[in-house]
Amino acid sequence: MLNNTIDVTGQFPTIDGLHISQTTSALNNLKEIIDQFDTIIEIGYYRGGLTQWFAVNKHFGAKIIAYDISDQERLSQKFNFNKDIQFCVYNCFTEIAIKKINDEIETGGKVLVFCDGGAKNDEFNLFSQFLKPGDVIMLHDYFDSRANEPYAHNITWPCPYESTYSGISSAVSLYNLKEYKYEEFRKSLIGAFYKGC
């Protein structure tokens, strides 16, 4: 039986033993804001650890929609995922997936889009154009290339950065995106922006 136990003692946090590919500080920062969103769209769920964490920490009635090109890692876990999660096996860059995600953003109330697939800058650049004022978009494994400091910001993190400010700066400007709790998230290897009015 699942009791939604978060363990932060290892290199990666876990939820009921399921690996979450985030830093503990990232989860702490997300915990402070997650209940503000009516729809959470995750691009790249891998094993589903963060997806489960979103489902446990969201507000009652919020939707979780998670996209990945393969379901093998998640299915191999034999984990009893929260019934509120909708897993979608799509390449997010296909026409059908783009339309679905656009529709979900348009009709989903206040939306968080979390880009954590294999092409994070491209995911951000594509889906940020669909945001409504007040919606938030984030990308993981993020390096703020404007700052002259080490990538991991003194956090023990084994993965190389996969997204950069320089890779998204045009979309930030073009789509009127503003920094969202930027310093806190940046130090947790997440870039965070909201759509301005």
Image (tube, helix red, strand yellow):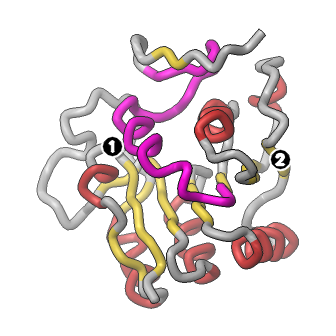
Amino acid tagged 2: Gln
**Residue 163, located in which quarter of the rendered image?**
bottom left
Position of 59 with respect to 94 (left or right) is: left
Amino acid tagged 1: Ser
Residue most extreme to the left = 148
**Residue 155, located in which quarter of the rendered image?**
top left
Position of 68 with respect to 195 (left or right) is: right
Please name the residue shown 65% across and 52% down the image: 42
Secondary structure of the residue carrying tag 1 is loop
Please name the residue shown 39% across and 51% down the image: 190
Please name the residue shown 42% across and 87% down the image: 176
Secondary structure of the residue carrying tag 2 is strand
Q: 37 or 7, which lies in front?
A: 37
* Residue 175 rendering spot, x and y as whole percentages: 48, 87
Q: 113 or 110, which lies in front?
A: 110
- Which of the labelled discs sits on residue 180, or is there none? none
Residue 23 part of the magenta segment: yes
User: Magenta residues, as a range?
Assistant: 12-40
Please name the residue shown 81% across and 22% down the image: 80
Q: Which residue is mark 2?
A: 86
* Residue 131 rendering spot, x and y as whole percentages: 59, 78
Residue 93 part of the magenta segment: no
Q: Which residue is mark 1?
A: 188
